[in-house]
Image: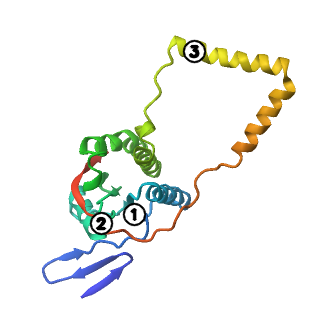
Amino acid sequence: MLFFLGPWSLVLSPRSVVWALPSPQGYVNDFASILNQDTKRTLENLASRLEKETSIELAIITVPSLEGETVEDYAVKLFETWKIGKKERDNGLLFLVAPNERKARIEVGYGLEGILNDAKATRFLRDYFVPQAKANNIPAGIIDTVTALNDLFTNPASAERAPPKKSSKLQSIFTLLIILIFIILFIRHPKLFLAMLLTSGSRGSSFGGFGGGGGFGGFGGGSSGGGGGSVGW
């Protein structure tokens, strides 16, 4: 006997009750219903941008229950069933959150393990997700983690958003000199200074944040190497 409950299928047999894995609904799959529309939109934009710029496929998933599985086993089953990542590259990422069991995992496709190894995946969760989750703000933790992952693969120079080092004395002096030059320029040539500002502003106005990007077109046949990181909170 088979019953359908939303994205899950409930299969009843004489011996056991088996939950089939849910089907993907997009980059963001909030089966636990903990994300509002603005959060979903932000995450969709981040995942879409990541795929557009790097071809990496990211699935963000919340589930109401791990159904007795470990978070590692559940993540691998989802990854392999959904085939996240491009088939020829195995460049998929899965970010799984189970709020009721207070578990989270980043599952990494084999092709990305050289950049995001197990230790780094765990550290990302501890640094970006766990603090927000402990403060009862799981959605913010998901956004912070996905943003950090995005930075890692699209902008390695600022990866992990490391805090800036304290400026040296020489750097402080240089900054002060630049400020003084602008002040002198403004005093002596105010019209020229204002013209420069207006020109700079008009150029900057042509740029904005990234939009929705391309729509979700399904995952591409990738597989997991079994690597990643897990945390509880």
Q: Tell me which label, 2 or 1, sits earlier in the chain.
A: 1
The x, y position of residue 101, in whole percent, is: 29, 55
Residue that carries the numbered disc 3 in the rendered image = 172
Give the residue at the far bottom of this rendering: 1
The x, y position of residue 207, in whole percent, is: 66, 48
Which corner quadrant of the image does residue 221 belong to? bottom left
Badge 1: how crowded within 10 Å, few (<14), some, or many (20+)? some
Which corner quadrant of the image does residue 91 belong to? bottom left
Which residue is at the front of the view, 94 or 5? 94
Q: Do the residues labelled 2 and 1 touch (CB within 8 Å)?
A: no
What residue is shown at x 42% (from left), y 71% (from top)?
Answer: 25
The x, y position of residue 214, in whole percent, is: 52, 65
What residue is shown at x 37% (from left), y 75% (from top)?
Answer: 7
Q: In which quarter of the image is the N terminus?
A: bottom left
CA gap between label 2 and label 1 equals: 29 Å
Q: Is residue 107 above or below residue 6?
A: above
Along the horizontal axis of the image, is 131 left or right of 77? Answer: right
Residue that carries the numbered disc 1 in the rendered image = 32
Instruction: Tell me the kind of residue under disc 2.
Output: Lys
Residue that carries the numbered disc 2 in the rendered image = 87
Badge 3: how crowded within 10 Å, few (<14), some, or many (20+)? few
Residue 155 appears in view: yes
What is the secondary structure assignment of the residue under circle 3?
helix
Total number of numbered labels? Answer: 3
Q: Which colour scheme is used?
A: rainbow
The disc label shown at residue 198, or none: none
Nearer the observer: mark 3 or 2; the answer is: 2
